[in-house]
């Protein structure tokens, strides 16, 4: 029996929202395991900068800039990338955003915008990448991974559209796991807790909120983006070949803990 | 790159009788392949020794220790032996478990007591005795082997096993919150249907004439219910153990990782 195969050598992996934060960290982690990384972001300069930095380290990385809510563009990206790279192994649905508002202030359009990016784009990308992965020789044919959130199960006030869309991606993950499992495609999701990333800039500027999260996390600190990227690289690998339909909490123990003694 | 270089791992239930491959043995071998030094603990010395020989075959270092994980004195001595040999412990993999079939009506009180005694103490006692050392060292990892049986009824009345495996999830979450300030992580692995000697043994025990069991048909029936289309192997469980013990899982604590081919995510 060979050693645990955490390697991603030669495997082509698509990562959305990769100009910064979790996406950039995941690109670095997957590239470090030998993956050939294809990065997407709306921010053309930002995503090319990340790709350029990876190439400077000797990794295989290319960037594309387009809007994920343009579903035809999503399809075209998958097709073109698979064609150019020769094959496709992995997809990481990472792109996301958040806008804070109480439910009484939310419009249907606020929800639609959130679901377009967090649910419909991942669905289209998963469908298209799976079509390509099915051409891989097997028995293992690919990996689909989506970034959900601790908010999918434990929201805080003011993020109804975000939290419900993150629950939807967790549900979609299980449905894809049931659909594609027999084809050797494993589908999983990560549920990060609170991470030191750009998307959290607004809440990170609130010192008392930062402390409150620390107090409610057994690890007593926010996560570094790299700490979410390591598990992502693992779930992309063949070492995770029997893990399917999982929502993996990467939250410093937050979901195991209800702070009942806090004022 | 070896993920677990210079780490010392204590694996309980590390042996498999009759030369087979169980989750504990596979985990010991995988951890060693990633650089960890292994203390293989089993109630049967011979089984622990067999695992150590396999670890050495793969180029690893291993010490066999015989102990009953439900016996506090024996556990304390076993941990002492591990510390004497290797100086520290970084990873504790609690893998011991036992199953006696039955529902609430037909499980005997003695079977119930056996399962609560073994399955719950198997995580509590080794943890209790290893923790002081992890705390003194400033960190470490505890991984408990629960089961998807701890989440749901799986079609066969195993109420004692399922209830005690469920308790391991709750034990692990509480442990994680307790020890996080010391830099110690605690998680549970929930294997699904894994082809192990213990699993085969259970099927045999619950069949009137074990000789008539058609394993291929049984495996196929089971595989048909699993999204990935196959029963798992101990290596699948071992790989998850390696990941949870590694620095790549540094923000993962108080949670469960299912290794079940997706069977628990569908109806």
Image (cartoon, rainbow, N blue to C red):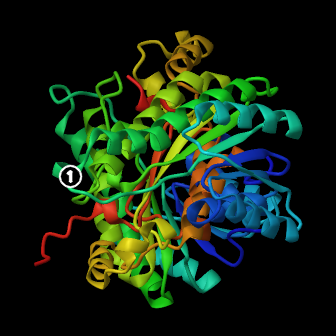
Q: Which residue is mark 1?
A: A105
B39 vs B31, nearest the viewer: B31
Query: Percent from the top left, x then y, of residue B148?
Result: 40, 39
- B150 w.r.t. B187: above or below: above
Residue B258 in sight in this render = yes
Q: Residue at x 48, y 87 (%)?
A: B138
Query: Percent from the top left, x then y, of residue A231?
Result: 58, 58
- B88 w.r.t. B253: above or below: below
Occupied quadrant, residue B64 = bottom right
B219 vs A98, nearest the viewer: A98
Residue B189 in sight in this render = no
**Residue B201 horizontal side relative to residue B160, left or right:** right
Occupied quadrant, residue B218 = top right
Q: Residue at x 54, y 9 (%)?
A: B212
A80 vs B72, nearest the viewer: A80
Chain of the residue under the numbered disc 1 shown in the image: A
- B132 w.r.t. B22: above or below: below
Query: Percent from the top left, x then y, of residue A109?
Result: 34, 40
Query: Percent from the top left, x then y, of residue A207?
Result: 31, 84
Occupied quadrant, residue A169 = top left
Q: Report the quarter where the N terminus of chain B lies.
A: bottom right
**Residue B205 horizontal side relative to residue B223, left or right:** left
Q: Residue at x 50, y 76 (%)?
A: B140
Q: Report the quarter where the C terminus of chain B lies.
A: top left
């Amino acid at each position: 029996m060979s050693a645990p195969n955490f390697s991603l050598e030669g495997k082509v992996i698509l990562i959305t929202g990769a100009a910064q934060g979790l996406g950039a960290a995941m690109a670095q982690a997957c590239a470090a395991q030998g993956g050939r990384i294809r990065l997407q972001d709306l921010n053309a300069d930002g995503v090319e900068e990340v790709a350029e930095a990876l190439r400077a380290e000797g990794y295989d990385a290319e960037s594309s800039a387009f809007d994920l809510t343009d579903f035809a563009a999503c399809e075209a990206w998958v097709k073109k990338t698979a064609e150019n790279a020769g094959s496709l192994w992995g997809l990481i649905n990472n792109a996301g955003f958040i806008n804070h508002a109480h439910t009484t202030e939310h419009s249907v359009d606020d929800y639609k915008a959130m679901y377009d990016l967090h649910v419909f784009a991942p669905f289209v990308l998963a469908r298209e990448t799976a079509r390509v992965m099915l051409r891989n020789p097997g028995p293992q044919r690919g990996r689909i991974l989506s970034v959900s959130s601790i908010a999918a199960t434990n929201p805080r006030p003011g993020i109804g559209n975000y939290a419900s869309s993150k629950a939807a991606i967790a549900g979609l993950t299980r449905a894809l796991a049931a659909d594609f499992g027999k084809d050797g495609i494993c589908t999983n999701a990560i549920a990060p807790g609170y991470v030191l990333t750009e998307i959290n800039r607004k809440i990170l500027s609130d010192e008392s909120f930062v402390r409150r999260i620390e107090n409610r996390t057994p690890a007593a600190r926010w996560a570094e983006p790299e700490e979410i990227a390591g598990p992502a690289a693992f779930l992309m690998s063949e070492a995770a070949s029997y893990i399917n339909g999982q929502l993996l909490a990467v939250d410093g123990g937050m979901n195991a803990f209800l702070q009942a003694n806090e004022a | 790159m070896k993920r677990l270089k210079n780490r010392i791992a204590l694996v309980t239930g590390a042996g498999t009788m009759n030369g087979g491959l169980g989750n504990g043995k596979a985990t010991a071998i995988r951890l060693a392949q990633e650089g960890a030094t292994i203390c293989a603990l089993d109630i049967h010395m011979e089984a622990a020794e067999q695992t150590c020989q396999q670890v050495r075959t793969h180029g690893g270092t291993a010490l066999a220790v015989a102990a009953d994980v439900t016996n506090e004195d024996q556990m304390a001595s076993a941990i002492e032996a591990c510390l004497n040999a290797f100086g520290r412990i970084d990873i504790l993999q609690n893998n011991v478990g036992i199953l006696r079939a039955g529902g609430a009506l037909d499980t005997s009180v003695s079977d119930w007591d056996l399962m609560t005694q073994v399955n719950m103490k198997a995580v509590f006692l080794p943890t209790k005795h290893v923790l002081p050392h992890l705390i003194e060292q400033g960190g470490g990892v505890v991984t408990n082997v629960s089961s998807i049986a701890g989440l749901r009824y799986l079609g066969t009345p195993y109420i004692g096993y399922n209830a005690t495996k469920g308790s391991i999830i709750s034990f692990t979450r509480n442990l994680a919150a307790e020890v996080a300030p010391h830099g110690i992580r605690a998680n549970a692995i929930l294997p699904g249907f894994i082809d192990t000697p213990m699993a085969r043994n259970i099927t045999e025990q619950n069949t009137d004439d074990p000789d008539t069991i058609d394993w291929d048909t049984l495996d196929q029936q089971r595989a048909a219910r699993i999204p990935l289309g196959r029963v798992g192997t101990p290596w699948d469980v071992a790989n998850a153990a390696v990941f949870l013990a590694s620095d790549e899982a540094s923000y993962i604590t108080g949670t469960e990782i299912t290794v079940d081919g997706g069977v628990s995510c569908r109806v």
